Image: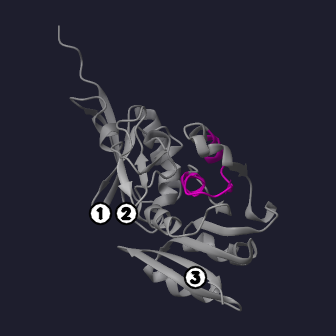
Amino acid sequence: MNRPRQRYSRLLVPKRSGDDAVLGLLALHDPLGFEDAGRDLIAFFRDADAARGAADVLGSRKIHHDLTTDIAEGDPLEAYRAASQPFPIGRRLWMEPGEPPLARAPEGRICLRVPASRAFGTGSHASTRLALLALEDEALEGRTVLDVGTGSGVLALAAAALGARLAVGLDTDAEAVFVARENLANHPFGERVRLYAGPLSACAGKFDLVVANMLAGEILPEARRLLGGASRRGRVLLSGVTRDREPSVLAKMRTGRWKLDGRRTEGEWISLCLAHA
């Protein structure tokens, strides 16, 4: 007797300036994985109720979406595998979103294991890639790093992997911090990462590098605190900024003794590095 074909649900969201925030919302509903489909972001779900719950959250925030449930598939893990292929970033990093890992990192590369099905950022989004590339170019050996809006913890983990003696990941979403703590256990350098749930205002101390992979609308209200978190010779790295919001971000951040010291772009996304003038 033939076994019944398994079913899945597909939630399509047109790409917009809040992609990372949308990924975070969808990840709370236990998706199988994500797929970048040109102009659209697609989330796949095994459980139809979970897909409907994710769609309801998007609807409550007036985020356009298209939900299709009860789709028959030949391979029950096809959607997850599509989102779980390992890939290189920059010169030294190797992203492994599979669970369990699908491949060993090539020689000379450092593996970052951030499972796609639990992710608030696996390195696949342009703003995260830009931040990782910028981290590679920073002199992190023996330094301290603050990762604001840490999500999956991928940037804090990357900082530790690249030599930081301490990386602190901070996020107001307690569920994201819970997932990030699980990710730390996958890395020998995870012991150099500390994670906290709470606002930036609750974070004391100064850091050699402050990283924020957040949307411009989240960066601007925290501009003073982001700059204030950097030590006297510290630097601030911003990603998640779109081209249309770059002027307003620079106008707010490039004040007094701060100057623009680096800039990367990918499509509409921009990362900015600020240093003391």
The quadrant in which residue 91 appears is bottom left
- Mark 3 Cα within 10 Å, few/some/many (few <14, many 20+)? some
Left or right: 200 in relation to 266:
right
Looking at the image, which is closer to me, 124 or 111? Answer: 111
- Which residue is outermost to the left? 1
Q: Amino acid at mark 2?
A: Lys
Q: For the residue labelled by badge 1, is the local secondary structure a helix, a strand or a loop?
A: loop
Q: Can you give x and y, in whole percent of width and height, for residue 224 in the image?
A: 73, 78
N-terminal of the two: label 3 or label 1?
1
- Give, as a three-letter code, the residue at label 3: Val
- Disc number placed over residue 49 in the picture, else none: none
Q: Which residue is mark 3?
A: 249
Residue beneath disc 2: 15
Q: Which mark is in front, 3 or 1?
A: 3
Q: Which mark is residue 39?
A: 1
Numbered-mark total: 3
Q: Are marks 2 and 3 in contact (CB under 8 Å)?
A: no
| Range of magenta residues | 154-181
Asked if residue 167 is among those painted magenta in the image, a careful observer would answer: yes
